[in-house]
Image (spheres, coloured by chain):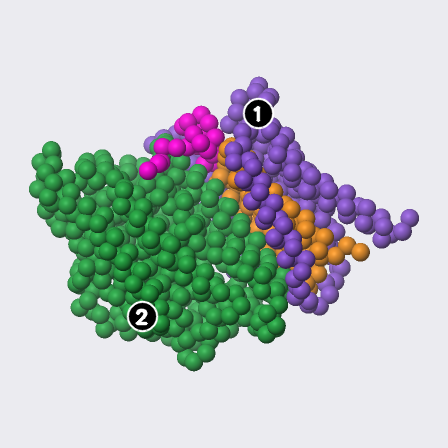
Chain colours: A purple, B green, C orange
């Protein structure tokens, strides 16, 4: 089979996986189902990163989003509901107006995005990105890197402070 | 180590001082449990004071960027550094006097305050969209926790949750706008946007996409400055948060939001013509966008404030209205407009923090934020009554108090630049605002109250009220200095 | 050939689905899922532009920081949601209604 065709088939299947599971997240009535559908969205997005040659980012997406944030959200679902309650219903409201708004947003963004002539810079290389990212983080992006560490410290202490049960 | 990095660090002393104090507060809170309340307070106060004095030598540094174009160092940045640190210091000094907070463990509060202050300093001088978004989120995440500090209090929790959900969506939309700009220009540096968009401007190409990106980014700025229609969180959050946090949120992150709004649009989306004036890019009319937001914001804020009975809610809507006045100064594209913004912020700092300080003192005694419970206050505490009256008159914009001069400059800038109708709208709004501020004064002085016991005021509170009162009353005596200070703070790094 | 447009359409779809989720859901955890969709859509944009349009790494670096921010945000958000649940035994946003006026 043609390589190009194979690439297209793989791409479209991941695209369908990403958008389809995202739709399940949004439209599913069960909270648990939404959470697990989100897993597939994150996974599909990681695959798209791999398609774009962003190998480090694809790995980071898997480790942090799937391994960290999603688990956190699942904890959130489980801890705020009784565990034996398998039918975790999530109600919706303003369904039709919201659908109209979202569809309009999609239509407008897609229409103009496809018509826009985007910036064209030098072609990106297909070399592995990890080394380059590491070097940039330690040189040009040293300040955001350090600032992010402060952010994580604030978030960690803040979150621990809020959930700590003992009241003074 | 890169030698440039060491040179940059020397221009980064205020932020380093804040970081050091931030870390010391965390360690001291754990290491010295017996004296931690006083120790953490002392470290935080010292850190802020040191950071303030370390900012002053940066005045007069040649305008440029540090850390490979992440942050700008110019007069405007230094002005906002000093302003934001001073605000945090005043809130810090007022916090132990509030009964809502003082019975709690305070270490984390000081830590959060320092962390948010540091992030605001970064936000106000960001010239890279990555740094802008990162520091905006740092400010927001710290603020969510501060709002929810009273974790056993239902209102504080609800306020925090609303703030969080609204904030994450608004900043998420903003982020999407930023990515579009990156796609159009291939850069995240704000100063390079102007150059990269030059071909687009010549041909009028991609105008629609740019407009979408701008609108999405305005959502983020609107959220931070609580401008309509991104204000929904504001009244609930200001009501539910502990009052010192409300006071803090109503001044500091708002000022940082204006700082970055000015920096973003003036360096990225306008061309500097003759010294001190700019021309907006003609094909995306962000100027008109901000004029509309400004008018709607002040009108909505003032009208909604009319029917409030809770003093914190009233001040929340009033702060929305004031954001509308401040936005007026940003649409006048010259140094006069920018100067009026800085002057307005200085006056707003003292009168607004002062009003909240009185609210804290009265709550300590009465346990209520209801304006009806302010009845008969003139008998119970003449000092608090006089001080509150002055703050209210200043917020109305009545001469000779500070607020009058702030409004004078903002409206004057509009009139001088062919936007007289805009100034008239502002003046009409001020007239509406008289009604609800006067209601507070009437309750305190004219209406009789049931309670007649005197309200005792500790000496620390006396000192704090005086610190806010003196500038509100006496700012006009130093008018030349303020004018010179703000005039010399106008330089923006334009790339 | 798969080009920039393909990725932009996926990102726009995720963005509008995220908006939809935020607008319709009553459950706070569910709203947070919508926010994650929005952040992911922005990340796809950044990485795609980084490859096809800008030709530099700044888009990818930006995306890494967004993942970090999303993690920090999720931690604080879940803490606040749990604290809320402890008080009113619900995470439905229409139960969070004592602040009105």
- Left or right relative to C59: residue B67: left
Q: CA distance from mark 1 to mark 2?
A: 59 Å
- Left or right relative to B469: residue A123: right
Mark 2 lies on a secondary structure that is helix
Q: Residue furthest front?
A: B421
Q: Residue at x 22, y 53 (%)?
A: B434
Quadrant of the rendered image containing residue B238: top left
Image vertical order of residue A108 relative to residue A31, above or below:
below
Residue at which label 2 appears: B415
Image vertical order of residue B224 relative to residue B332, above or below:
above
Q: Residue at x 61, y 53 (%)?
A: A109
Q: Residue at x 17, y 63 (%)?
A: B400
- Is residue B22 visible in this depiction of the protein? no
Residue at which label 1 appears: A88
Q: Which residues are magenta?
A: C79-101
Q: Residue furthest top?
A: A84
Quadrant of the rendered image containing residue B292: bottom left
Mark 1 lies on a secondary structure that is loop
* Residue B462 drawn at (x, y percent): 16, 49
**Where residue B176 is drawn, which disc sits there?**
none
Q: Is residue B379 magenta?
A: no
């Amino acid at each position: 089979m043609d390589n190009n065709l194979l690439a297209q088939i793989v791409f479209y299947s991941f695209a369908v996986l990403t958008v389809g599971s995202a739709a399940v997240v949004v439209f599913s009535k069960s909270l648990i189902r939404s959470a697990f559908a989100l897993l597939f969205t994150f996974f599909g997005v990681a695959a798209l990163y791999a398609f774009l040659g962003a190998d480090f980012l694809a790995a980071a997406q898997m480790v942090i989003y799937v391994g960290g944030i999603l688990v956190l959200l699942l904890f959130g679902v489980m801890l705020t509901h009784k565990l034996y309650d398998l039918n975790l219903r999530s109600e919706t409201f303003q369904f039709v107006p919201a659908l109209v708004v979202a569809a309009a947003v999609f239509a407008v963004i897609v229409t103009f995005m496809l018509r826009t002539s985007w910036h064209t810079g030098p072609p990106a290389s297909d070399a592995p990105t990890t080394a380059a990212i590491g070097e940039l983080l330690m040189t040009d992006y040293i300040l955001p890197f350090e600032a992010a560490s402060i952010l994580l410290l604030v978030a960690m202490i803040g979150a621990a402070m809020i959930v700590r049960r003992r009241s003074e | 180590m890169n030698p440039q990095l060491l040179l940059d660090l020397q221009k980064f002393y205020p932020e380093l001082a804040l970081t050091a104090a931030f870390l010391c507060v965390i360690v001291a809170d754990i290491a010295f449990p017996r004296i931690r309340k006083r120790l953490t307070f002392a470290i935080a106060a010292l850190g802020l004071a040191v950071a303030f004095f370390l900012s002053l030598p940066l005045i007069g540094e040649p305008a440029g960027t540090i850390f490979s174009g992440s942050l700008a160092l110019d007069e405007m940045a230094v002005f906002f550094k000093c302003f934001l640190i001073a605000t945090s210091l005043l809130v810090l000094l007022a916090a132990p006097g509030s009964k809502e907070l003082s019975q709690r463990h305070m270490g984390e509060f000081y830590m959060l305050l320092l962390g948010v202050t540091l992030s605001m300093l970064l936000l106000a001088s960001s010239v890279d969209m990555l740094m802008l978004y990162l520091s905006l989120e740092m400010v927001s995440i710290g603020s969510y926790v501060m709002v929810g500090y009273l974790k056993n209090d239902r209102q504080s929790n609800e306020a925090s949750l609303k703030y969080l959900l609204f904030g994450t969506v608004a900043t998420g939309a903003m982020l999407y706008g930023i990515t579009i700009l990156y796609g159009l220009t291939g850069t995240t540096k704000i100063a390079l946007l102007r150059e990269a968009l030059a071909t687009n401007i010549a041909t009028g190409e991609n105008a629609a996409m740019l407009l979408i990106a701008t609108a999405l980014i305005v959502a983020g700025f609107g959220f931070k400055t609580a401008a309509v229609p991104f204000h929904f969180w504001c009244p609930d959050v200001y009501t539910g948060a502990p009052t010192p946090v409300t006071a803090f949120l109503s001044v500091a992150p708002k000022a940082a939001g204006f700082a970055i709004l000015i920096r973003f649009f003036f360096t990225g989306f306008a061309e500097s013509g003759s010294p001190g004036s700019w021309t907006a890019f003609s094909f995306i009319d962000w100027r008109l966008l901000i004029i509309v937001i400004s008018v709607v914001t002040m009108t909505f804020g003032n009208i909604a404030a009319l029917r409030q009975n809770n003093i914190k809610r009233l001040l929340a809507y009033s702060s929305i209205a004031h954001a509308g006045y401040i936005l007026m100064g940003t649409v006048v594209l010259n140094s006069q407009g920018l100067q009026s913004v800085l002057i307005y912020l200085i006056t707003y700092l003292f009168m607004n923090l002062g009003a909240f300080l009185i609210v804290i003192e009265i709550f300590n005694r009465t346990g209520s934020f209801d304006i009806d419970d302010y009845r008969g206050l003139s008998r119970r505490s003449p000092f608090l009554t006089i001080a509150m009256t002055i703050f209210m008159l200043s917020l109305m914009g009545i001469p000779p108090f500070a607020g009058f001069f702030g409004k004078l400059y903002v409206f004057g800038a509009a009139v001088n630049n062919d936007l007289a109708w805009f100034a008239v709208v502002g003046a009409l709004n001020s007239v509406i605002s008289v009604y609800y501020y006067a209601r507070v004064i009437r309750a305190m002085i004219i209406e009789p109250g049931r309670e007649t016991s005197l309200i005792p005021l500790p000496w620390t509170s006396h000192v704090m009220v005086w610190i806010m009162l003196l500038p509100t009353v006496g700012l006009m005596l130093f008018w030349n200095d303020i004018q010179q200070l703000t005039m010399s703070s106008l330089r923006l790094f334009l790339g | 050939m798969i080009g920039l447009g393909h990725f932009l359409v996926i990102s726009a779809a995720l963005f509008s689905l995220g908006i939809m989720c935020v607008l319709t859901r009553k459950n706070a955890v569910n709203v947070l899922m919508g926010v994650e969709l929005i952040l992911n859509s922005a990340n796809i944009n950044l990485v795609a532009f980084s490859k096809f349009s800008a030709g530099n790494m700044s888009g990818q670096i930006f995306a890494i920081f967004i993942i970090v921010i999303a993690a920090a945000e999720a931690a604080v958000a879940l803490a606040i949601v749990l604290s809320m649940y402890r008080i009113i035994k619900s995470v439905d946003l229409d139960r969070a209604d004592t602040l009105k006026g």
